[in-house]
Image (cartoon, helix red, strand yellow):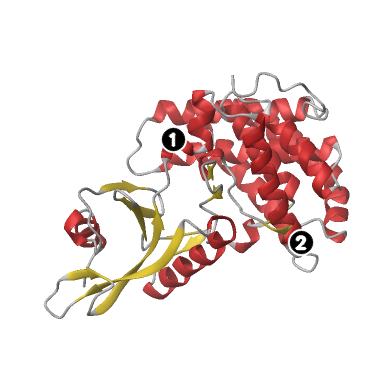
């Protein structure tokens, strides 16, 4: 039996790779180990099971590696290369793609230039309105080509209901230190959701819901050449069934959290021109409040880890997302309609 620690040790050694690698940088996440060489990235899914995903068997890890490859080919075909078997010989030696029985599976990707990720460029102030419009055009084309999810559209509503309940369960825990700020927000969001449910159902019925990316954040947008959008959420289809305006509004809000509030109106106005069917301001405000609450919850989830790293950071971030969610609900006017973006890229 080859355990996870042995696999990580093997994959952390530059000599383990079939192409010439002079170094390996290993990074651990909740769900995976990621191994970066000069020009390649390999992702190994951990054998874990959570309420929202199950990677506990070799067969399931293979399936979700293949899903990750298939789904990310839609927006990052140049980056996602293949699914590679990790094998073990009869002598107990591990290898990538060679002989022996398969003991795990990895997703192989080309390594992108970190300096060209949207979050990095935003922090450095070198993003132009032209860059943002290219992102918007890429995503608008992607959503336009996706078939409407009318039959499965209720998965979107169900996921909003389910995730909002989890938001309440986590953010409302007094021991996590944000419940005083979060509970009034959650009450207001629940009331707004109830009020807007007929509008969201109407968008489902009219074919406005598609299978999207599922985790559209600035750190997943590569604005080099060619433009790529990576790290699609692969483990739960219902979380990819989404209103394109919800997803692009979320990207705009995450850019605003990095100090680039001008990005969101550019994206929304472009979508209105390309896709039509823009939701009214109340619906967009609820979408924004929901996504910011979800991000606050994901920050706090780090405080529930067996070993908590940087607890002050996660609490601070959660409170900033809660503040952003409150702002969405308190001022649901059309975000920056026809604003001047002359400072973009300054």
Residue 44 left/right relative to 145: left
Tags 1 and 2 touching, CB below 8 Å: no
Q: Residue at x 76, y 62 (%)?
A: 153
**Residue furthest toward the front?**
225
Q: Secondary structure at mark 1?
A: helix
Q: Which residue is mark 1?
A: 115
Q: Secondary structure at mark 2?
A: helix
Say which of marks 1 and 2 sits in front: 1
Q: How far across and how far down the image is residue 309, in percent? A: 35, 34
Q: How far across and how far down the image is residue 41, in percent? A: 36, 54
- Quarter of the figure with the N terminus: bottom left
Can the viewer see residue 107 in this picture? yes
Q: Which residue is mark 2?
A: 154
Nearer the observer, 156 or 11 = 11
Q: In this picture, is 59 found above or below 36?
A: below
Q: Residue at x 39, y 72 (%)?
A: 57
């Amino acid at each position: 039996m080859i355990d996870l620690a042995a696999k990580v040790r093997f994959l952390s050694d530059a000599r383990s790779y079939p192409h010439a690698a002079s170094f390996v940088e290993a990074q651990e996440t909740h769900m995976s180990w990621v191994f970066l060489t000069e020009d390649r990235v390999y992702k190994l899914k951990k054998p874990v099971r959570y309420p929202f995903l199950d990677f506990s068997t070799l067969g399931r890890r293979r399936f979700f590696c293949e899903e990750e490859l298939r789904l990310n080919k839609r927006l990052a075909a140049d980056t996602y290369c293949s699914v590679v078997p990790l094998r073990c010989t009869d002598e107990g030696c591990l290898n990538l793609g060679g002989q022996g029985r398969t003991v795990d599976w990895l997703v192989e990707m080309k390594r992108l230039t970190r300096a060209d990720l949207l979050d990095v460029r935003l922090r450095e102030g070198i993003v132009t309105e032209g860059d943002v419009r290219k992102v918007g055009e890429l995503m608008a084309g992607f959503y336009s080509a996706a078939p409407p999810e009318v039959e499965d559209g209720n998965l979107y509503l169900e996921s909003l209901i389910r995730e909002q309940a989890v938001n309440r369960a986590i953010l409302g825990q007094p021991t996590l230190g944000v419940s005083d700020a979060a509970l009034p927000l959650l009450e207001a969001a629940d009331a707004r959701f109830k009020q807007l449910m007929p509008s969201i159902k109407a968008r489902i019925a009219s074919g406005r819901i598609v299978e999207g990316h599922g985790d559209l954040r600035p750190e997943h947008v590569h604005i080099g050449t060619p433009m790529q959008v990576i790290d699609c959420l692969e483990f739960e289809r219902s979380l990819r069934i989404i209103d394109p305006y919800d997803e692009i509004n979320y990207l705009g809000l995450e850019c605003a959290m990095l100090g680039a509030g001008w990005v969101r109106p550019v994206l929304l106005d472009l979508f209105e021109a390309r896709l039509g069917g823009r939701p009214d301001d109340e619906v967009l405000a609820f979408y924004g409040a929901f996504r910011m609450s979800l991000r606050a919850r994901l920050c706090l989830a780090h405080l529930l880890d067996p070993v908590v790293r940087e607890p002050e950071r996660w609490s601070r971030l959660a409170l900033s997302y809660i503040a952003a969610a409150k702002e969405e609900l308190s001022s649901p006017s059309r975000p920056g309609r026809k604003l001047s973006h002359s400072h973009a890229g300054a």
